[in-house]
Image (cartoon, grey):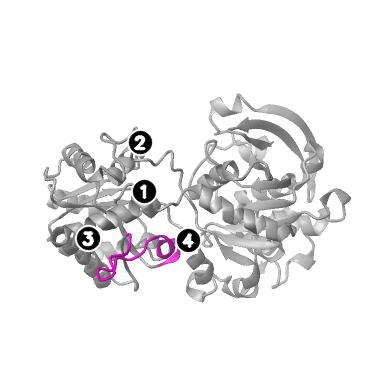
Amino acid sequence: MKQILFAASECVPFIKTGGLADVVGSLPKCYQKEYFDCRVILPKYKVIPEKYTSQMQYVTNFYMDLNWRQQYVGIFRMEWEGVTYYFIDNEEHFSGDQIYAGMPWDLEKFAFFSKAVLSVLPIINFHPDIIHCHDWQTGLVPVYLHERFQGNEFFHGIKSVMTIHNLKFQGIWDKDTIKSITGLSDYYFTSDKLEFNKDANYLKGGLVFADAITTVSKTYAEEIKMPFYGEGLDGLMRARTHDLRGIVNGIDYDEYNPETDPLIPHHFNSKNWRKEKVKNKLALQKELGLEEDPKVMMIGVVSRLTDQKGFDLIAYMMEELCQDTIQLVVLGTGDPKYENMFRHFAWKYDKKVSASIFYANDLSHKIYGSCDAFLMPSLFEPCGLSQLMSLRYGTVPIVRETGGLRDTVQPFNEYENTGTGFSFANYNAHEMLGTIRYAERVYYDKKRQWNKIVDRAMEQDFSWGASALQYQELYDWLIGY
């Protein structure tokens, strides 16, 4: 039995701000129980809902030194859906109303958490073969493992994996502050370790000392070796190319299931979607005050409204796009200039454009379950989950070929009759509009081919089970089985 410990700053269903929480909450349930005992360790935030904290059992507490002072470490434990979770308690660090307070407060919080992850292992008598660390918040776990815990016999042979969910976030601050917080010696603050442009970098430390590195799609694993995507760490990524692999994320196929989804009015599947899905479109048109027309092509957008997601391209082409025979349904919040741009077009073309400038889970499901196409022209996208959800609901993705979008959406080829969506290569507004208009032509003029694209999209399997098998292979390789 191989023992795996996930260390992360968030995890569904307890606490979530982004896709990281989905990965940490979903993967451990998918590992083969007869081969893997996978447990998860998290901070015990005050903002975790009471229905979970009331089920946590107190294990014990102790004091741990974090450089120049002693700090309280409480340990709680609970079982959830067959997985054991441990929670590290410390009121000073985890009692805020937000799980991330920003720099420099998060630096000490996650230095404390990283050290506590290792310190509690002998006490709970769990000896993992691998500690699987997620993002910069746990970047110091491989560093501390190397620095002070390897001398302790209990820790011999423990390997570490570092997963990058988004390389943009690295935990960077000035060297003296980080030295003072972590208690690490000067040896660790050189350019081949934590030092980064005269500052210090938590994620870089994790990437230098981890035994293996993963990221959330094959293409992103290649992209981050280049300066444009590498966020200053492309040289390190190239140096560690043999230890780096990309494993695409999955989505919860129970939660996102058009046959059973309680948040959409009419259920459908890959056999009857031609008859049933259009009923959702009509219901959504009515709800949003759009022209009720079953034949018009409806394009959905569910996203943070930021430059990273390609909204400068959409803004550039929005007036032209509104001249086409389409409807555009937008859901999300973000940069005020994009929020206001969509509000303006929803006012100007009120029967064609709907702008919901907030986030609502039920409306997002209705958009996936109603639209004909889904637009996602990202500048970069480590994995992306929206295109996986739209494929699941037979909503044809129109994407830029980057990161996980390139790995999960196969562009339509009308001569070979293959493909599950439409894509364009260059980050260019005219190229994007050309691709949208190509999709419109297929939708209106080649209905049979469009329907086949939808059929193929709904046959794809991006459930967590497929990702779990690849992680299991990685663990076997690391442990040497």
Residue 373 is a magenta residue: no
CA gap, disc 4 and disc 2: 27 Å
| Closer-to-camera residue (331/272) | 272
Provide the major secondary structure of the magenta segment.
Answer: loop
Sooner in the amino-acid sequence: mark 3 or mark 4 = 4
Residue carrying label 3: 449
Disc 4 target residue? 382
Which quarter of the figure is the N terminus placed in?
top right
Is residue 288 positioned above or below 169 on the image? above
Mark on residue 261? 2
Secondary structure of the residue carrying tag 1 is helix
Q: Percent x, y for residue 375?
A: 29, 57
Q: Earlier in the sequence, mark 1 or mark 2?
A: 2
Query: For residue 419: magenta?
Result: yes
* Quadrant location, the C terminus: bottom right
Inspect the image, locate mark 1, and give the three-letter code of the amino acid beneath it: Arg
What span is colored magenta in the figure? 402-420
Identify the amino acid type marked 2: Asp
